[in-house]
Image: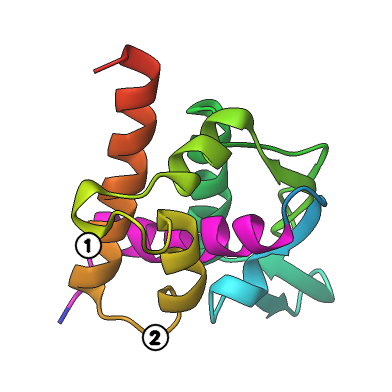
Amino acid sequence: MTTSNIERFDQIVAQVLGDLYTSFPCPATLKATSYIENALAYNDFLGAEVITGDGEFFNNSLGWLAQAGYLRCSQIDAQLGIAGGVVLTAKGLEALRAVPASLEGKCSLGERLATQAKSSGADAIRSLVGEVIGAAVRGATGV
């Protein structure tokens, strides 16, 4: 079965935001190879590893999170799929600290992402990522 871009994006976002929530407020270095199995491939002509399409997808996912205001990073090596100095923004932290009404008094979305991103199924991940983005949108619009 082919995985859609949205499913791939949700999986990366869940893992990245979970990791950043765990390391907050300390900046992290994120490597595509930690999140994507085939992020780099050896190029015989260049004699070095180069980023693959999957690695570029990781870069684009991080880029979207940054443009949407969830994270910021101080250094990017797009050719190797490495982002340094990555930290959650206030918007990202607020979204991850949200506790859905159905779970009042239990763990935050960030805590759930940190523990479930690597072990949960695609539907659970998609739901969590949707809740995080929804929490940020509600916070920004005051709804």
Q: Quadrant of residue 125?
A: bottom left
- Asked if the stretch drawn in magenta spans residue 8, the answer is yes
Q: Quadrant of residue 142?
A: top left
> Residue at the spot x=18%, y=55% of the render?
102
> Residue at the spot x=47%, y=47% of the render?
96
Q: Which residue is mark 1?
A: 4
Query: Looking at the image, which residue sits at the far top?
Result: 141
Q: Which residue is mark 2?
A: 119
Question: Dot 1, crowdedness within 10 Å: few (<14), some or many (≥20)?
Answer: few
> Residue at the spot x=49%, y=64% of the render?
111
Q: Is residue 71 above or below residue 16?
A: above
Residue type for callout 1: Ser
**Which comes before the other along the chain, label 2 or label 1?**
1
Residue type for callout 2: Ser
Camera-side mark, 2 or 1 = 2
CA distance separating discs 2 and 1:
19 Å
